[in-house]
Image (cartoon, helix red, strand yellow):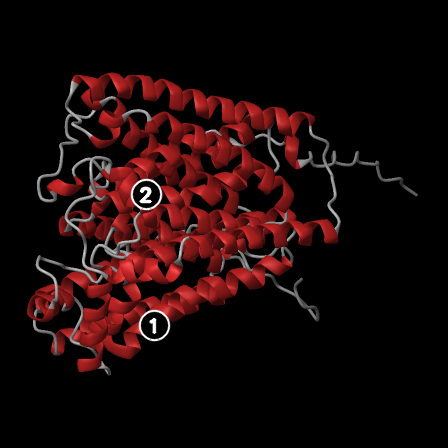
């Protein structure tokens, strides 16, 4: 009789709050951050050559890694396959519309765009595996934060960025912050997509320093959105944050973090309110340069104070504070009543009438603040009406991808050149008819449907990161409905990445794991492999 030696049991895994970020995880987040930053820094990669270069690089990467057996890291979930089929169907319909479109060149341009987004979706899905969603979230948030800091530096310290010249094609908008995406609304909406990701990092298990650093950028993000004077960016930020608060498992911790972030953001905006030349110009004046230096220091101070106060709150506020259902619902009711009162005080009927009017030529001597508080649609009502008229003329298949520009040139009701309908959904309705419109709804809806299903089955930490992606996708979907974000590559790449992470393996529910990539087959006799 032999006695087998007793092996010492493995030590229990460290709690999440004490785990260190592994070098591999940090490297993965940095790679994602670099990709997001580079796509945005190159003028938002809006140009045809820029987009095509990215698409070629993506598809070559996919072909080589799949051919060499490096990707996929896990079996692709059925939900991701279905979404990929929908994207491929949209690409096929776009290409097919060249048969009836007036401009084959414009149609091929739109086809290339869809193929690029399909490549982004495919690469993110193939490179994802379970339990890596936080690394993707951190990487995207870091890349967006870097873009925001560069944008602020271009205004506060313009000598560092000699390439950020004032736009000459829209002189009435010359003071709105637009660098490096070359479009103010696009910059603000990209920044808005990072807000729920930063909140997730602030409330997720981790070191105190890491959580404080995650919340610290909010004053800088608010300063960017204010200087862009973007109502779409403001709305996307609010929608993303509210959605994250509603969906996350760490709701009260997230509410506390959001409150501190809002206070710090308000401080950054107050800093800018007293600096007229820095905000409204002339931007090349000595006064603007002096105000930029002082604003840079004060906004940086607001970021440091926000992170420090949050670190103190995390350190000293007791954990596990529970709020009874009655108190929670009472707070929700108070917030809802305040929101309704604000809407009623704003006179929504009058504001809607103002939205439908043609744009005004002047906003006075404080255009940034005046535009933020204005209800003018800047011509969007007319652009959207033209897309609806285009759909009515050919409801089945539309006039072909890329045809809105020509339609507006013939039937537009406002003077000026317009290329896009400033709404992904209405533009698809006019250019590709009902099939294109339904395909876009199905693509976006697949992310929400799968994400919500997974949300209910996750543990609290998994639910939090899934909630952040859902909130980001919601912010993107809303922004794409009111502006040409589909055409701005840097913003849509992030939106498509959210879609891929929600339907791919990254947010998969722990439990029965899909078969990992392997060429080794198990041999079993009378049994079924586990």
Left-right relation of 514 to 231: right
**Residue at 24% across, 16% down:** 290
Label 2 crowd (10 A; few <14 / some 14-19 / many >=20):
many
Toward the viewer: 493 or 329?
A: 329
Toward the viewer: 52 or 200?
A: 200
In this view, which residue lies farthest toward the right?
A: 1
Q: Is mark 2 on a helix, strand or loop?
A: helix
What is the C-alpha distance between the residues marked 2 and 1?
Answer: 27 Å
Of the two numbered discs 2 and 1 on the same chain, state the one appearing first in sequence. 2
* In this view, 272 is above or below 72: above
Q: In which quarter of the image is residue 29?
A: top left
The image position of residue 488, as x and y in percent, is: 24, 51
The image position of residue 86, as x and y in percent, is: 36, 70
Look at the numbered discs 2 and 1 and tell me whether their residues touch, using CB distance below 8 Å. no
The image position of residue 349, as x and y in percent, is: 37, 63
Q: Name the residue under label 1.
A: 439
Label 1 crowd (10 A; few <14 / some 14-19 / many >=20):
some
Q: What element carries label 1?
A: helix
Left-right relation of 254 to 424: right
**Residue at 29% across, 70% down:** 90
**Residue at 12% across, 66% down:** 413
Q: Name the residue under label 2.
A: 188
Left-right relation of 249 to 289: right
Q: Quarter holding the C terminus?
A: bottom right
Q: Can residue 53 be seen in this view?
A: yes
* Residue mark closest to the camera, 2 vs 1: 2
Toward the viewer: 474 or 33?
A: 474
**Residue at 41% across, 53% down:** 346
* In this view, 470 is above or below 440: above
Instruction: Specify the label residue 271 is tagged with.
Output: none
């Amino acid at each position: 009789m032999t006695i087998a030696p007793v092996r010492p049991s493995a030590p229990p895994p460290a709690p999440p709050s004490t785990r260190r970020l592994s070098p591999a995880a940090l490297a993965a987040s940095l790679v994602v951050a670099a990709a997001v930053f580079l796509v945005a820094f190159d003028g938002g990669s809006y140009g045809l050559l820029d987009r095509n270069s990215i698409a070629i690089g993506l598809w070559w990467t996919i072909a080589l890694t799949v051919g060499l057996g490096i990707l996929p890291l896990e079996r692709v979930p059925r939900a991701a396959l279905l979404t990929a089929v929908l994207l491929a169907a949209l690409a096929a319909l776009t290409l097919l519309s060249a048969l009836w479109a007036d401009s084959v060149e414009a149609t091929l341009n739109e086809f290339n765009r869809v193929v690029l987004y399909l490549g982004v979706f495919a690469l993110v899905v193939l490179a994802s595996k379970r339990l890596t969603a936080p690394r993707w979230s951190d990487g995207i948030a870091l890349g967006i934060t870097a873009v925001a800091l560069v944008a602020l530096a271009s205004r506060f310290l313009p000598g560092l960025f000699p390439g950020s010249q004032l736009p000459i094609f829209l002189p009435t908008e010359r003071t709105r912050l637009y660098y490096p995406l070359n479009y103010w609304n696009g910059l603000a909406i990209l920044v808005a997509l990072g807000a729920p990701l930063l909140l997730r990092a602030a409330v997720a298990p981790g070191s105190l320093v890491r959580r404080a650093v995650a919340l610290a950028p909010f004053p800088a993000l608010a300063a960017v959105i204010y200087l862009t004077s973007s109502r779409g960016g403001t709305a996307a930020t609010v929608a993303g944050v509210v959605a994250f608060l509603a969906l996350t498992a760490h709701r009260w911790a997230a509410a506390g973090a959001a409150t501190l972030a809002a206070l710090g953001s308000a401080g950054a905006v107050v800093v800018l309110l007293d600096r007229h030349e820095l905000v409204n110009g002339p931007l090349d004046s000595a006064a603007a340069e002096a105000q930029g230096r002082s604003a840079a220091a004060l906004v940086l101070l607001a970021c440091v104070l926000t992170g420090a106060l949050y670190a103190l709150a995390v350190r000293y506020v007791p954990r596990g504070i529970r709020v009874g259902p009655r108190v929670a619902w009472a707070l929700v009711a108070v917030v809802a009543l305040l929101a309704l009162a604000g809407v009623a005080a704003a006179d929504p009927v009058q504001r809607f009438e103002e939205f439908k009017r043609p744009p005004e030529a002047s906003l006075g001597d404080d255009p940034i603040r005046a535009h933020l508080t204005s209800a003018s649609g800047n011509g969007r009502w007319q652009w959207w009406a033209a897309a609806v008229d285009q759909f009515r003329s050919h409801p089945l298949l539309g006039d072909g991808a890329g045809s809105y520009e020509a339609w507006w040139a013939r039937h537009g009701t406002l003077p000026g050149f317009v290329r896009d309908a400033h709404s992904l959904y209405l533009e698809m309705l006019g250019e590709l008819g009902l099939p294109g419109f339904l395909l876009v709804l199905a693509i976006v809806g697949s992310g929400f449907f799968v994400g919500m299903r997974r949300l209910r089955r996750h543990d609290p930490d998994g639910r939090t990161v899934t909630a952040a992606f859902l909130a980001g996708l919601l912010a993107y979907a809303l922004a794409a409905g009111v502006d040409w974000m589909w055409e701005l590559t840097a913003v849509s790449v992030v939106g498509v990445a959210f879609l891929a992470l929600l339907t791919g393996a990254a947010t998969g529910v722990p439990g029965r794991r899909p078969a990992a990539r392997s060429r080794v087959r198990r041999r079993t006799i009378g049994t079924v492999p586990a």
